[in-house]
Amino acid sequence: MELAGKAAVVTGGAAGIGLALATALVEKGCSVMIADVEADEAEKAAASLREKGGTVEAAACDVRDYDAVMALADAAWSSFGRVDLVFANAGVMSGSSVIDYRPEHMDWIIDVNIKGVWNTVSIFGRRFRDAGQEAAICMTASEHAIGVPHLGGGIYTATKHAVLGMADVMRQELPENITVSLVFPGITQSKLYDSERNSPTGPTAEKAKEIGARVMAKGMDALVLARRTVEGVANGDFMIMTHPHIVGYAEKRWREISAAIAAVPPFDDPEQYDVARVQKEVLGG
């Protein structure tokens, strides 16, 4: 996709990876709508890019709210006349061992990271499909979708696996004129460590926030990641990797899968339970 002249929407766009994506898109000549639950921050981010010559709008949007995402789509088409790309980037994290998560925190993370992504890609995706236009959908996954980088983020990890699964099915279902991409960030300079400032139970504990800030400060520059992501989307890549160490998580996962499959007793016809084959036989296709 040639990006110059295109219009894009970025959720979670007021800071971190989202703002970096908006910046990288403006660098490529795109008009951009920055959407964020923190409306004032979204407007500040948009203003900073307008000062650099970008055509940038801001919108308040809680991606958990289906109607709010519908309104975001309406606003984007009204502002730009068209939308060509959507980046479902909004995401949150809260740390705890899996069995010690509080129900309200689990609901919040799932609502933002799975339901919010689905709200975004389904609403924008249907408009792209119905228009029959060339378009691109990009979701922000995580290295957590490939393996387990660290403990204490089990529900976040689960949601990022879900985003990978959702995208993998979507790319099979959508017409060829709509590409689906995922980016799998490792540690990146952002405020993910302070996600709980918008959680049902209030801000992150100061000690945890201090540690998170020190860890994230050692991460990749978000703009480096964003430029790589935008390049991958323009190329139509499904998986966009930015942190090469992730190969270690992938290899470990594959070794476990391969060993587990090797332990299955042999079948005369190993393909007999392949659901794709069974469906084809049942449907007569």
Image: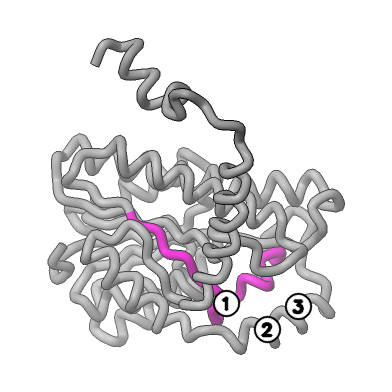
- Please tell me whether residue 248 belongs to the stretch shown in magenta: no
Tell me which numbered mark, 1 or 2, is placed earlier along the sequence: 1
Query: Disc 3 to disc 1, how far (Cα)?
Result: 15 Å
Q: Which residue matches tag 2? A: 215
Residue visible at 65% across and 62% down in the picture: 148
The residue at which mark 3 appears reads as 209
Residue 215 sits above or below residue 140 on the image: below
How busy is the neighbourhood of tag 1: few (under 14 within 10 Å), some, or many (20 plus)?
many
Report if the CB atoms under discs 3 and 2 are less than 8 Å apart: no
Task: Label 3: state its secondary structure.
Answer: helix
Q: Which residues are magenta?
A: 181-197
Q: Can residue 167 be seen in the rendering of this structure?
A: yes
Figure label count: 3
Residue 187 numbered tag: 1
Pinpoint residue 219: horizontal percent, then vertical percent: 56, 84
Tag 3: Cα neighbours inside 10 Å, few (<14), some, or many (≥20)?
some
Q: Quadrant of residue 206?
A: bottom right
